[in-house]
Image (spheres, helix red, strand yellow):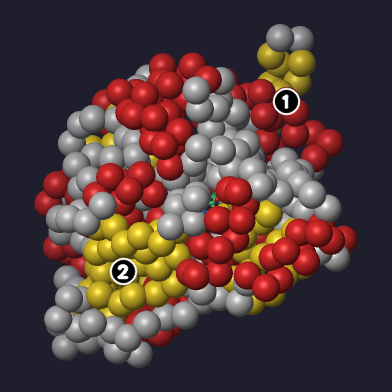
């Protein structure tokens, strides 16, 4: 159906904006990955669940493909659709009244986490789990998982919602939670927008202390940083934990008849405690028994500054060529026991220039705190998230994609589970392997909830 006809049909159904101009459609044809291009026929930006429901009912009746799009920070076209309808959640941006007794704030799914953080901070509150990037939407992260640097304690963002309002692919508006329509609740959390559109979420919040102290430690040894991370998590002595791998280019060496750039790796570990000014942290106690190569810096900041701590990095990225490049990010959650060997092997094979200014993330966490069934991670008490986050000019990306596909396949051989917002090029067998015993149930649920397969059609190869 042409953009023109769609606009005429959808206009009376939608409270909110509709876009069909070429430059608007172009803006909604790419995501942060800049690797996939799919041009929609129309973009609708509803401001009510009712409008979302009417659009879905219409799309289902006419078998028109639909993708839900938050801020499109995913990287393999998860939020894009070819010649269909993009439902942009930017118009679903209202934050509701705080429910103090239930420690919960309701909000629409297009609310950007950063806005919610600012809103709650004035009341001394914070969402229980925050992602590093606060420029993404509530619906976008709940649909993937929403991993944060205190997930070792509180699970992912999907664990920290009391209930959701969902519009099904046939246009029904449903509430779901652990006790009401639980199967839908468990399909839309980490369901990659395949089973319904989240329109509202009741988000758990907690009181936070006003200040944060971060110890910025540096390691020159992977085992040491992993051991210290495990110790911190086991003892629960600090509130937040995050780490990276940083290459130091050393030179070029001869390999297979070619000169190849190589480097050594260092590992910053940032560990943070919340505190009240009348009870300052005791550094000797906080760092007791840890064995960094060096303590680089200790930083005290407000809770709000801490939540936005990576903004300077993102600003730098935005002002450098990195932002405009392709971003085939490959993230995986590894079994703790296999993680050191896997990470070392991969790091040995990554020439420093391959990152193009990006970095490599280490995310030590508990394997037990999340209960979201579709957020797949390996069994075991601890797990290690590992992410290669390059920014590559389009002309040079093909060999990098091949290398990343190999690293992805190898991680799965080691029992890892991919995090699905990044660069994912799975065969049907890999999808089956990823979902494991849930695969048949998911295929059945897709058939039942989305009989015309209109919702986010191009990502998962369902049977
Ligand atoms: C710089 C950067 C840092 C990041 N840091 C983290 C991090 O610390 N932790 C982490 O977990 N992730 C992180 N990510 C990944 C990011 O959180 C995910 O890509 C997230 O999905 C992006 O949210 P979005 O609003 O952009 O969603 P989109 O990319 O627009 O959508 C993602 C998926 O969710 C679906 N979707 C979106 N909204 C809805 C809805 N309302 N209902 C149903 N389905 C929906 C889409 O169809 C798509 O499949 C980071 C990404 C970037 C670029």
Q: Secondary structure at mark 1?
A: helix
Does the residue at mark 1 contact the one at mark 2 (Cβ under 8 Å)?
A: no
* Left or right position of 381 against 43: left
- Give the image location of residue 329, x and y in percent: 58, 41
The answer to which image quadrant residue 339 occupies is: top left
Residue lying furthest top in this view? Answer: 256
**Along the line of sight, the residue nearer the viewer: 245 or 441:** 441
Upstream in sequence: badge 1 or badge 2? 2
Residue closest to the eye, 99 or 267: 99
**Position of 283 relative to 404 (above/below):** below
Residue carrying label 2: 203
Q: Is mark 1 within 8 Å of ligand 1?
A: no
- The mark found on residue 441 in the picture is none
Give percent across and percent down for residue 407: 53, 24
Instruction: Sort mark 1 into few (<14), some (14-19) or many (20+) by Cα contacts within 10 Å.
Output: few
- Taking the image as drawn, is residue 267 in sight? no
Q: Which residue is mark 1?
A: 399
List the single residue furthest toward the front.
61
> Depth check: 418 or 433 in front?
433
The residue located at (31%, 69%) in the rendering is 203
Residue lying at 56% horizontally and 38% vertically, measured from the top left: 452
Q: Residues within 10 Å of mark 2 (few under 14, many from 20)?
A: many
Judged by depth in the image, the label closer to the viewer, 1 or 2, is 2
């Amino acid at each position: 159906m042409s953009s023109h006809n769609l606009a005429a049909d959808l206009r009376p159904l939608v409270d909110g904006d509709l876009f069909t101009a070429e430059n608007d459609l172009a803006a909604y044809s790419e995501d942060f990955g800049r690797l996939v291009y799919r041009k929609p026929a129309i973009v609708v930006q509803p401001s009510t669940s009712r409008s979302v429901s009417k659009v879905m009912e219409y799309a289902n009746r006419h078998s028109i493909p639909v993708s839900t799009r938050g801020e499109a920070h995913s990287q393999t076209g998860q939020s894009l659709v070819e010649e269909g309808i993009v439902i942009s959640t930017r118009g679903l941006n209202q934050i509701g009244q705080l429910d103090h007794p239930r420690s919960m704030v309701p909000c629409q799914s297009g609310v950007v986490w950063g806005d919610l953080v600012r809103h709650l901070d004035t009341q001394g509150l914070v969402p229980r789990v925050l992602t590093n990037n606060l420029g993404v939407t509530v619906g976008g992260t709940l649909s993937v998982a929403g991993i944060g640097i205190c997930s070792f304690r509180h699970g992912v963002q999907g664990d920290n919602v009391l209930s959701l309002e969902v519009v099904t692919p046939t246009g029904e508006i449903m509430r779901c939670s652990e006790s009401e329509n639980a199967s839908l609740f468990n399909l839309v959390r980490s369901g990659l927008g395949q089973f319904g559109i989240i329109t509202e979420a009741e988000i758990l919040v907690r009181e936070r202390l006003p200040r944060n102290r971060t110890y910025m430690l540096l390691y020159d040894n992977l085992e040491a940083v992993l051991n210290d991370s495990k110790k911190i998590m086991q003892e629960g002595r600090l509130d937040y934990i995050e780490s990276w791998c940083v290459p130091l280019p050393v030179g070029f060496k001869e390999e297979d008849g070619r000169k190849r750039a190589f480097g050594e790796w260092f590992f910053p570990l940032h560990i943070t405690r919340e505190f009240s000014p009348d009870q300052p942290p005791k550094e000797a106690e906080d760092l007791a028994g840890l064995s960094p190569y060096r303590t680089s810096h200790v930083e005290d900041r407000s809770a709000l500054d801490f939540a936005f701590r990576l903004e300077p990095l993102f600003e730098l990225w935005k002002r450098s060529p990195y932002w405009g490049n392709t971003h085939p990010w490959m993230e995986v959650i590894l079994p703790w026991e296999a993680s050191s060997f896997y990470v070392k092997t991969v790091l040995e094979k990554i020439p420093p220039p391959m990152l193009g200014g990006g970095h490599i993330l280490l995310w030590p966490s508990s394997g037990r705190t999340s209960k979201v069934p579709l957020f797949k991670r390996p069994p075991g008490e601890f797990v290690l998230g590992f992410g290669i986050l390059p920014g590559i000019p389009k002309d040079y990306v093909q060999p990098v994609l091949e290398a990343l596909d190999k690293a992805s396949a190898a991680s799965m051989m080691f029992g890892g589970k991919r995090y699905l917002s990044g660069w994912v090029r799975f065969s049907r067998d890999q999808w089956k392997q990823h979902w494991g015993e849930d695969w048949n149930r998911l295929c059945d649920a897709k058939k039942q909830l989305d009989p015309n397969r209109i919702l986010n059609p191009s990502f998962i190869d369902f049977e």
